Image: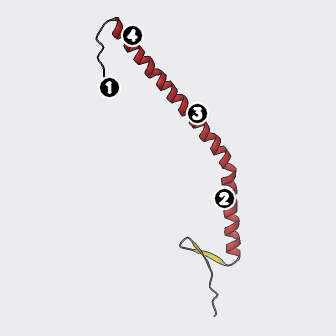
Amino acid sequence: MVREYVGTGPFAEIVAASDRTGREIAEAERKQEKAQHRGELERLDALAAPVLELDRAAEILVRAHLVAAGYHRHKREWRRRRERGD
């Protein structure tokens, strides 16, 4: 940030108004850009939702298949259950 003293009087008031207008325009542009980014994120979330739902369903089916095949989870890893020969 740089401060520049322009004095007083009509010229200083014009410069101050110009600076204020520039800041207001920059703020409006930032708000518009932020709204566009928010809209893009909402659109991407909507596109990703079916994929995430399919992923959850596939995870459930895989777990069910592995359990039915005799596997179990040990420390976040699938392992085949040992056969006990009593």
Local packing at callout 3 (Cα closer than 10 Å; few below 14, some 14-19, many 20+) is few
User: Residue flagged by tag 2: what amino acid is it?
Assistant: Arg
- At x 61% / y 38%, what residue is drawn? 40
User: Residue flagged by tag 4: what amino acid is it?
Assistant: Ile
- At x 39% / y 10%, what residue is drawn? 14
Earlier in the chain: of badge 1 and badge 2, it is: 1
User: Residue under circle 4?
Assistant: 14
Q: Nearer the viewer, residue 27 or 68?
A: 27
Which numbered marker is on residue 2? Answer: 1
12 to the left or right of 47:
left
User: Residue flagged by tag 1: what amino acid is it?
Assistant: Val
Earlier in the chain: of badge 3 and badge 2, it is: 3
What x and y, as percent, mark residue 62? 69, 68
Earlier in the chain: of badge 1 and badge 3, it is: 1
Q: Residue furthest bottom?
A: 86
User: Could you tell me if the residues under marks 1 and 2 are in contact, i.e. CB atoms within 8 Å?
Assistant: no
Q: CA distance from mark 1 to mark 3?
A: 30 Å
Earlier in the chain: of badge 1 and badge 4, it is: 1
Label 4 or label 3, whichever lies nearer to me, is: 4
User: Residue under circle 2?
Assistant: 56
Which numbered marker is on residue 36? Answer: 3
Residue 53 position by quadrant: bottom right
Residue 10 position by quadrant: top left
Earlier in the chain: of badge 4 and badge 2, it is: 4
Local packing at callout 2 (Cα closer than 10 Å; few below 14, some 14-19, many 20+) is few
User: Could you tell me if the residues under marks 1 and 3 are in contact, i.e. CB atoms within 8 Å?
Assistant: no
User: Could you tell me if the residues under marks 4 and 3 are in contact, i.e. CB atoms within 8 Å?
Assistant: no
